[in-house]
Structure formats: C-alpha cells, structure tokens
Amino acid sequence: MAFRLSNNLIGILNAVTFLLSVPILGAGIWLGTRADGTECERYLSAPVIALGAFLLVVSVAGLVGACCRVTWLLWTYLLAMFVLIVVLLCFTVFAFVVTNRGAGEAVSGRGYKEYRLGDYSNWLQKRVESTKNWNRIRSCLQDAKVCKSLQEKNETWAQFMSSDLSPIESGCCKPPTSCGYTYVGGTEWSKTPAGNSTDPDCGAWSNDATGLCYGCQSCKAGVVATFKRDWKRVAVVNIVFLVFIVIVYSVGCCAFRNNRRDNAYRGGWKGRGGYA
C-alpha cells in the first residue's frame, strides 16, 4: 500500500527537524567544552544541549514511526508534541502576564530613558534581586563588555545627552541623572561633593571599568527591561510557532490513524491466509 500523504508530510518535516537538531546539539556541546568560554556561555550550553537532544529524539521517533509504520513510536512522538504544545502555550501566557508592567521613564532634555526596578512585575524583580542570579548576570554583562561602546566614544556632553542608550547601557554604564554627577567622557563621571541625592545607586557608582553601576538597582532594572522586551518578542514568535506545531500535530494524528488502519488491514489479510 502506498504511503499516505500525512505519513509523507510527517516524514519530511521530521527529516528537516533532525538535520536542524544536529548543529544545535553540536553548538551546545561546543559552548560547554570550549577552553576559553565565558561563564555565560557555559551557562547557556545546558538549555541549548537539552533543546538539541529533544529535537533529535522526537524527530527520529516521528520519522521512523511515520515512514516505517511503527505505531508505538508515532504515539510517543504525538505525546511529546502534545507536551510541547502545552508547555509553549503556558510559557506564552506567562510571558505576557509578567511583562505587562514597567517601562522606561523619559528624562527631560535627554535622548535616553531611565529605569526603576520597582516598576516591573514582582516575579521579574525577584529573579534579579537574588544574589546568586545577579552574580551570574553581572558576570555575563562584564564578559559581554556591554559598556565598551560607551567607553570608546569621545562624545561631548551635548552628544551624550542626545544618545539613544539601550536599557542596559542606561542602567549599568552611567550613574542615575538624580545623582547630579558631572560628565567627563565615555563612562567617566565626576562626583559632586555637595550632592544630596538619596538614591543608593549614587554611592554604588564607580569609574572603574569593572565596577561602573553593575551593582546598582538601575542596572537590574535595565536588565529586567531587556528581558521584558525580548520575552514579548519571543511570546509573539511562540504564537506563530504554536499554530505551526498544532498543524503538524494534526497531520501526525492522521498518520497515526493511517498506521492503525494499515496494521488492522495487514492483520486481517494474514488471517485470511495471505496469497491464494
């Protein structure tokens, strides 16, 4: 009996997924084992390896189950796909819920915005206020040299005021405007002895390239603002991906039904003695 359309489609889709999973898995292993890798890269290697391994196993199960008519493998594939749909749906809803609060505050006469940690959801605040989490995030920020572009610029005060800084640059690479510090150049600021700001970030600021405002609440707020922006983008992509996964799952259900029918047909045919 010729392969049915649904089985062919599932086979093709899983063959493509299998080919994609190999470089993903390889990249994760490379990130985790490279000798000069940063702590951030090693931290990212675990989820990349997990994603690559999951795609590899699921694609093999779907490919073999659809093309070789192995019903139990196709059932396993459908179960994994169903779990993936539920997880993606929950994550998408959760991402929209935790990112519905908080935004940068415009500063008069400045091209950039400033960020306050208390404006964001409690869940996001707790993630960065954890000492263990923040030490890891801070290490990643320093390894990524997020303030390097500002350090290398030779801007005047007027040029700096009109700069469109990213949330992380605004929060981690300069002191808050409320401190009243004098801009010298790059990431260097002159503290004002008579400053009477009550913002604790003013005392945390350092001109040392390894210090800057990495210990400031404004830096944590900048990281959270970046998380919020990226998570919203991921949530939108997830909606499109969910639609695709649901379609693939539906086709897989058709292939599973075809396998059961073919198995029943073969069983009935053998029961009648096969060839006359």
Image (cartoon, rainbow, N blue to C red):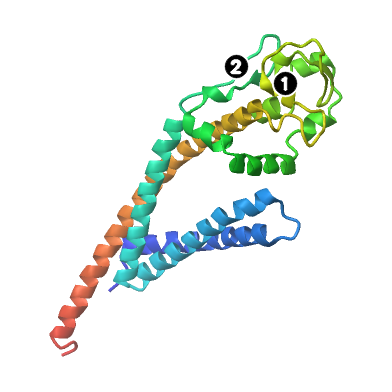
Residue toward you, 265 or 154:
154
**Which-is-in-front pick, marks 1 and 2?**
1
Residue toward you, 176 or 160:
176
Task: Name which residue lies at 36% across and 74% down.
Answer: 68
Tell me the residue that label 2 is attached to.
Answer: 105
- Image marks 1 and 2: residues in contact by CB distance under 8 Å: no
Element on which disc 2 rests: strand
Reply above or below: 167 against 85.
Answer: above
Q: Is residue 195 visible?
A: yes
Reply above or below: 236 against 202.
Answer: below
Q: Position of residue 255 (x, y in %)?
A: 30, 63
Which image quarter holds the C terminus?
Answer: bottom left
Task: Name which residue lies at 61% across and 39% down.
Answer: 131
Which image quarter holds the N terminus?
Answer: bottom left
Q: Position of residue 41 (x, y in %)?
A: 66, 51
Q: Position of residue 101 (x, y in %)?
A: 48, 24
Q: Which labelled disc corresponds to residue 202? A: 1
Instruction: Describe residue 57's horizontal placement relative to residue 173 as left or right.
Output: left
Reply above or below: 62 against 104.
Answer: below
Element on which disc 1 rests: helix
Q: Position of residue 8 (x, y in %)?
A: 37, 64
Task: Name which residue lies at 23% across and 74% down.
Answer: 263
Task: Name which residue lies at 83% across and 26% down.
Answer: 186
Instruction: Describe residue 98's horizontal placement relative to residue 30 as left or right.
Output: left
Q: How far, Cα to Cα, is label 1 from label 2? A: 18 Å
